[in-house]
Image: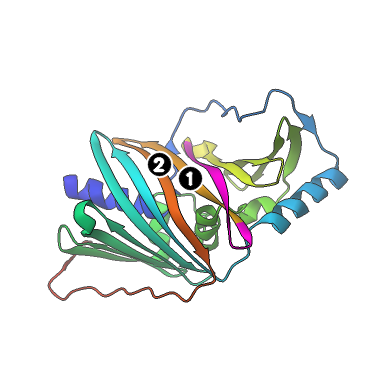
Amino acid sequence: MRNNILIKGAVVLVLLITVLSCAPKKRLVTDGEGNERRLSDTERLDVMNSIIQNEPQFTTFSGRAKSRIVINKDNYDVTANVRMERGKAIWISVTALMGIEAGRMLITPDSVQIINRLKAEYLKKPFSYIHHFTNKALDFTNLQQLLAGHIIGQAVEGDTKVWAVDGGHILRGQTNELVYTIHVDAAYRMMSTLLDEAVHNQRLEVRYSAYQESGRMASPYQLTISAVADGFNLQAEMSYSRVAYDEALAMPFSIPARYKEIH
């Protein structure tokens, strides 16, 4: 049972809880929501263009984050090394005390692989495996967008409505069963993303803060994550100490022959 919790925790950490968790149907109150003004179509287009123009544009991303994770009653202090190649791969190595690697993950548009070094086990599944935990509308591109603090593609392509609020804007819309609420600040930087699937009473939220310049781009150095599901409660905080773009990256991933596959 504890091993299953560790595997779920690794999945949630790496996907920045694209896990959609059970939540009350009450709509989340977003910061600054009390003084809203619905924007015209022209104003809406200006805001959407400004958000896209202010997003970090990169081919590769790497970062190192101290992370505190609470899974049910268990507490973990770990370090996550995150590497991404846009459109191709997400790689994360999680180390615990004394720099010992506890696990490693490699996600591509067609597969999910996890190594649990603490148990000498591994998981190898098609990308659709994550849809056991998430809305099927979420794809590999969405995972990279959430990790990088980008607006999700559905909000750009869909019929998104925009409101001006104190200190920024709120975007709301729906694609199929997925309802999204996105908050950006006055500089058009991502402050939070909320994804809500009302049919299954599911929700995910990621909050971004502590923006710093990294080269020519501003990046969120702190992320706060919350998830609750049946028998599974996760709270996580990630604080990046280093972020870099467009550096040459290696994503080593090999499964030792003696490791046992988890089905």
Q: Residue at x 75, y 28 (%)?
A: 36
Magenta extent = 202-217
Q: Amino acid at mark 1?
A: Gln
Amino acid at pointer 2:
Glu
Mark with earlier residue (1, 2): 1
- Location of mark 1 (residue): 222
User: Which secondary structure is most common in the magenta stretch?
Assistant: strand
Determine if residue 1 is in view.
Answer: no
Q: Secondary structure at mark 2?
A: strand
User: What's the image's color scheme?
Assistant: rainbow
Q: Is residue 112 above or below residue 180?
A: below
Q: Is residue 209 magenta?
A: yes
Q: Which residue is mark 2?
A: 237
Position in image of residue 204 (x %, y %): 48, 41
Residue at image location 15% in from the left, 76% down from the top: 257
Quarter of the image where the N terminus is located: top left
